[in-house]
Structures are given as structure tokens and as C-alpha cells.
Amino acid sequence: MNTADYERLSAFPLGEAGTVTRLVVYLASPGGGSQRIRPVIYRDAAGTPSVLLAVGPEQVVTPAASGEWVALPLTTPVRLAPGTYWLGMLTGDTSKATVHFVGITPMSKVYIWDAYANGPDTPAGPVTTAAGPLSIYAEYTP
């Protein structure tokens, strides 16, 4: 699968209110290349992503071939009430390699086609397929 122009999202239950400042995702780049990425957070609606709540600035990431945790700050911290949210990233084009999104935790995951050049959609587009592995979490303060 082409890794450009997709949002990869995982469902995330938040048990207490908190202010999210960044997302952290586990990535690997076996070919040593890079990829443009923007973090996103969506509200959940009946088990699917809906309204865009937060986005971060573009970053070009080149993680280690063996994988590493990469921090993706949000443009503005977002205060979230307890509930379920969709954490993920919008991926742009790559440079000489595909960045792999490595799953080390079981979660509900989806892909949504979304042109990188236009920024993340709100509401989220239709889910196109179940996603492969993705390990991501939010850093927040209660």
C-alpha cells in the first residue's frame, strides 16, 4: 500500500479529562528514508472517527530501521473530556523509503484516504479499510 495521502488512526479511550500536548507513535524506516507526517485527533462517533479536534505541524521523520518512538507535537494543546478518541497521523510523500507503522499493542485501527496537500478533513472521511499495526499514544496532563 502507498503510504502517502492516508490517515492512520487508532481508537483511544480516555478515562479522565486531560490536556493533550503531543502524540507519540512507533515508526520504522527500513530503507533509511523519510516521510512527511502531521498528527491528528478526532472525536469518536459510534465507533468511527468524526470531527477533527486537533492537528499538529508537519514534521519530516526518518526513524531508525529497527524502529523507535517519535514525538509529534500538536499545534495547540487540546482539552479532552473522558471518552473515546481517534489518535493518528496524516502521511505525505516519502523520500527513498516507506515508513512503517509498527504495531506493538492491539487497538482498533483504520485507514482513511485523505490528500496530504489539503490537510486533515473534518469530518473524517469514510473508513476505507481496516488498518495494519499502529502503536500510538497521547501525552496529556489531567
Image (cartoon, rainbow, N blue to C red):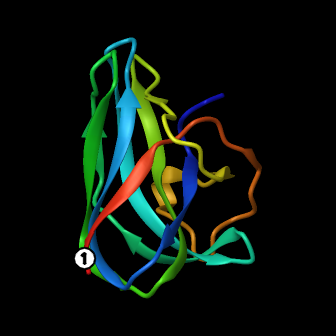
Question: Going by the picture, which residue comes out furthest to the top?
Answer: 31
Tell me the element at label 1.
strand
Q: Toward which corner of the image does residue 79 lie, by quadrant?
A: bottom left
Q: Who is closer to the viewer here, 74 or 107?
A: 107
Q: For this rendering, which residue is in front, 127 or 95?
A: 127
Q: Nearer the viewer, residue 104 or 120?
A: 104
Return the residue at label 1.
Answer: 76
Q: Position of residue 40 (x, y in %)?
A: 43, 63
Q: Position of residue 47 (x, y in %)?
A: 72, 70
Looking at numbered disc 1 in the image, what kind of residue is underneath it? Thr
- Position of 56 with respect to 106 (left or right) is left
- Residue drawn at (61%, 30%) of the image: 2
Q: Residue 71 location in percent, x, y? A: 25, 48
Taking 26 as reference, is 135 left or right?
right
Report the quarter where the N terminus lies. top right
Q: Position of residue 30 (x, y in %)?
A: 39, 13
The residue at the point 33 percent across, 15 percent down is 65
* Corner quadrant of residue 10: bottom right
